[in-house]
Image (cartoon, coloured by chain):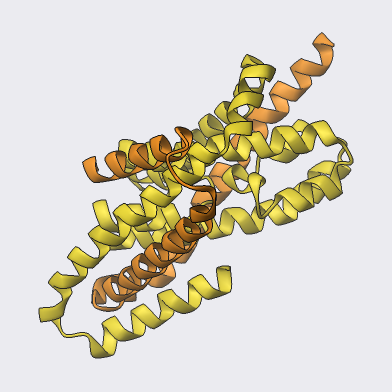
Amino acid sequence: MGLIVISLIMGILISYKGLLAENLYSFTDELTLVGLFLLLFTMGVKIGSDPEVVSNLKTLGFKAIVLSLGSVLGSVILLFLFEFKFKRED
Amino acid sequence: MLVAIIIIIILGVISGYFIIPTSLLEYLDLISTISLSILLLGVGIDIGRNKEVITDLKRLGFKIILVPTLIAIGSIAGAILFGILIKLPVNESSAIAAGFGWYSLSAVILTKTYSTDIGALAFLSNVFRELFALVLIPLLAKMGTKLTVIAPGGATTMDTTLPLITKSVNDTEIAIIAFISGAVLSAFVPILVPLLI
């Protein structure tokens, strides 16, 4: 948790203050991609080596659909109400 | 990109299931800690680089920040409510929803800092969010809504779903708001996910 915040803030400061040469940005993109792929691989390994998660994959799929439906509906409803109110004020 | 991501996860699952002995698993923790800090450093660099978004935000002011804020509140509240139906604790459903469709980042943060199964659930749930968005965006546009078209995409409206939004709603202003909203929501993800869990 502390690590997440520190890395993130360091990154924001580095680029916002322009501390990085312009030609280095493509390199940071690649670095991010390598970090992401390594993490996704270790995530896969953790899933594969945990028999409980493997046996739960089907229920996970169902739960995932329910949660994403909730998120999508919640955000659409709020923004729809906002847009409607906006239009009447115009 | 999604295909590459799924292939890598599946490779990991197969190695974890068949090959990698439990004695090596503790090293995985070190690898993932280092990778996570590298990844977040890169994410931070990307956020800080979006100076245009930051100046646009200053210019367009308060109203425009309302759009991603409402999307964030709606996403999290909706997931909490639907999460209660499937008996999911509030911290888990809210943190998963705070991925806002950015499946890779939310999944790896939750796997690393919380648990493997919630990480897997975050990945799937946020992939589904992007899929739902791809269906809903043209549908909402057809119904004649404009701002609402931005909602289902969440953080993805700054990249993967932006072309579909501009194509469905022929309005430059909506495209700009969609981009800014996606950028703001993307910046929320690495902050809100660890905060909510």
Of B77 and B37, which appears nearest the observer? B37
Q: Is residue B11 above or below residue B161?
A: below
| Residue at image location 61% in from the left, 40% down from the top | B182
Total tally of numbered discs in the picture: 0
Q: Position of residue B19 (x, y in %)?
A: 25, 90
From where the camera sits, is residue B145 visible? Answer: no
Q: Nearer the viewer, residue B51 or A36?
A: B51
Q: Is residue A60 left or right of residue B15?
A: right
Give the chain coloured orange: A
**Viewer-side residue, B126 vs A62:** B126
The residue under the point 84% across, 42% down is B141
In this view, B100 is above or below A41 = above
x then y, percent, for residue B25: 17, 74
- Residue B165 seen in the current view: yes
- A42 lies above or below B82: below
Quarter of the figure with the N terminus of chain B: bottom right
User: Residue shown at 75%/16% (left/top)?
Assistant: A85
- Residue B142, image x and y in percent? 88, 44
The quadrant the C terminus of chain B occupies is top left
Furthest-top residue in view?
A89
A15 horizontally vs A70: left or right: left
- Give the image location of residue B7, x and y in percent: 48, 79
Q: Nearer the viewer, residue B163 or B84?
A: B163
- Quadrant of residue A52 in the image? bottom left
Q: Colour of chain B?
A: yellow
Residue drawn where x is 55% and y is 34% of the image:
B184
Q: Residue furthest bottom?
A: B18
